Image (cartoon, rainbow, N blue to C red):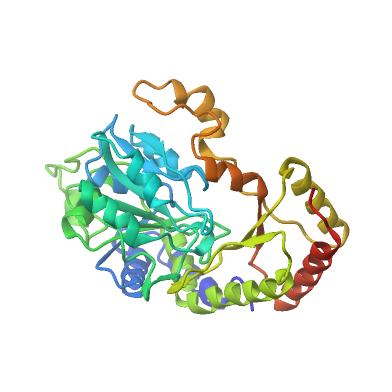
Amino acid sequence: MERMTELERKYVLEALDNEFATSRNSLFNNRLEQAFAERLGVRFAIGHVNGTATMHTALAALGVKPGDEVIVPPLTMSSTALAVLHNGSLPVFADVDSATFNLDAASVRARVTDRTRAVISVALYGLAPDYDALLAVCRERNLPLIEDNAECFLGKYKGALVGQQGTFASFSFQASKHITCGEGGMLTTDDEALADHARRFSCLGYAGVSAKQGKITRNDIQDPNYSRHVTLGFNYRMSEVTAAVALGQLERADELVANRMRVATIFDEAIAGVEYVQRQAMPAGYVNSYWSYSWVLQSKQPEKDWYAFRDLFQRNGGDGFYAAWKLSYREPLFLNEIQHTPGIRQQYAPGLCPMAEYLQPRMVQMKTNYWQLDEAHQQAAILKQTLHSFRPK
């Protein structure tokens, strides 16, 4: 199969033919938002320039203020925590589950204070977190849950699509994601009042936009007495060309996600029976959409073994794999700058999130974006060969 097809090219050319005229400059955005909401089974979808802006918008729409605390996982791309900082708020890191690698509800409960205003979960690598447990904590303290689903599209939790659980759900169309237009994002919700706030925040605070209306009208623009800006907002809008590509990808989403899931099955066969491999768990009722195929190299010396395994895999002909991101609170930005921000209560020292700190240096992320399955079979054979010849310290 192909990553991009004639469908995406056709839609891009149609967008270009419109020449970005004001009267026709949101046609693909409208089509994409409506189709995305229908596919996810939610009422409202609002296109954004990327999947970090979506989370910033969600926090602002919920009324989270500068200095408020938002609980996030440390084991994910740091955009989750950065969105909190963009809002002027303070990230609080909770630990992750040892089997699923996702945010642990017990740790979230322990980190909630009277300053906590929201929780952001991540569906890591394509696997949903335990939403029931997280939502139970949120309900106890009257906190909204924002789903960061950048790595999960068409995954499921107990029969429901990921994206149907939180107050808001955020999706990314960045180049590596299940559906892509290079850069882009989508924010969804069932709450019309929140969708109105989110649209306005992402569209420069325009008076004439709403949950269902993404552009102000020509008559409004041409009126010398029209008051445009009623609140502070950012220019987080998605472009028409981006929306055109994303619409084509959305219409092909089932085949794109199914291909990644087939690749995961191929890798399952490669790691079967290897004692020192801990695969990301698959609890009953979950469906992983496999943005990547992830496992833990059980080693007492990961600082040596991870690199030794990677090097052997590449010598055997493997095309490489990814490590987990450095934990957000161990990044230089957080250690050197955010740690000293007034109001930060956590010390970003080893031991803050013990399970995340154990998992991160041992994690292996195998790519699932092999659009020709012969390549996946070849890489799986090399992985199996490497696993059976390698012995961790």
* Residue 73 image position (x, y, % from top left): 45, 45
Residue 93 or residue 260, whichever sits in front: 93
Residue 255 image point, x, y percent: 54, 79
Q: Classify 5 as above or below 29.
A: below
Q: Nearer the viewer, residue 13 or 338?
A: 338
Q: Quadrant of the N terminus?
A: bottom right
Judge from the rendering whether residue 36 lies leftward or rightward of residue 264; answer left or right. left
State whether residue 251 is above or below residue 186.
below
Name the foreground residue: 237 vs 113.
Answer: 113
- Residue ID at (37%, 39%): 84
Left or right for 304, reference 330 = right
In the displayed structure, would residue 303 be above or below residue 285? above
Looking at this view, name the residue that lies furthest to the left. 225
Q: Quadrant of residue 24?
A: bottom left
Q: Is residue 108 above or below residue 259?
A: above
Residue sitting at 38 percent across and 26 percent down? 344
Residue 52 picture location, percent across and down = 43, 47
Q: Residue at x 61, y 49 (%)?
A: 324
Q: Is residue 199 visible?
A: no
Closer to the camera, 265 or 62?
265
Residue 51, given in percent of the width and then of the height, sits at: 43, 52
**Quarter assignment of residue 28:** bottom left
Residue 362: in sight, yes or no?
yes
